[in-house]
Amino acid sequence: MTEGGLARRVELTGWSAFLLGVVCAGLAGLEVAIPVLLRRLAETPGLQEDAQLVRLGAAFSQGAALSAAVNAGFGAALVVVGWSVARRRPWSHSALTAVAWASIPAMALLAVPGVAPLLALGEATAGSKALLIVASAVLVLLQAVAVLGFLRFWRRSDVRALFG
């Protein structure tokens, strides 16, 4: 790959990380707002006895604080690091490497709160619950594989040289 092509890929990586940070920050805001909205909705006359709405509100509330905190932290980090990668600041290469590695356990940590609302919405059959859990585990695994694939590119010496 030519140096110009590699530089464009690195810049695209930076802006992609920046955009992902904005998305994470938005998710954090939703994770704070949705439980509040569901509680208010459940207090609406005529909906107070809706068991599914109550289960959904409880499922969102259960992991909302942890999910919001993790997404807000990653969002802030990715905005700063992504901007810095796009500008090729020397420290940003190792910072994005650290954020990428940290994202793997964070994804695993957020899997349970992420699936809980889907389980609350779905029917309580053992087969559908097991299928949802397996599908979620496969998605977390695929995300980890994608991060490792990215790190394989990111740790190449020609990429690191662009930050020196």
Image (cartoon, rainbow, N blue to C red):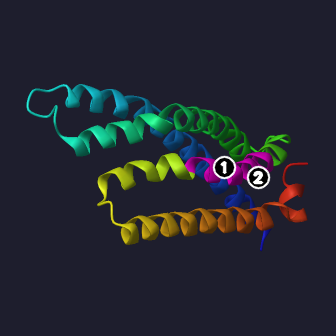
Q: Would you say 113 lies left or right of 7 here? A: left
Magenta: main secondary structure equals helix
Marks 1 & 2, CB-CB < 8 Å contact: no
Can you say which quadrant of the picture contains the N terminus? Answer: bottom right
Callout 1 crowding tier (Cα within 10 Å): few <14, some 14–19, many ≥20: many
Range of magenta residues: 96-110
**Residue at the spot 14% in from the left edge and 34% down from the top edge:** 47
Residue 68 seen from this side = yes
Q: What kind of residue is marked 1?
A: Gly
For the residues marked 1 and 2, what is the alpha-carbon distance in whole angstroms?
16 Å
Quadrant in the picture for residue 43: top left
Q: Secondary structure at mark 1?
A: helix
> Which residue is label 1 attached to?
14
Q: Position of residue 39 (x, y in %)?
A: 28, 28
Q: What kind of residue is marked 2?
A: Trp
Query: Is 60 or 55 nearer to us in this picture?
Result: 55
Q: Would you say 22 lies left or right of 54 here? A: right
Q: Position of residue 24 (x, y in %)?
A: 53, 41
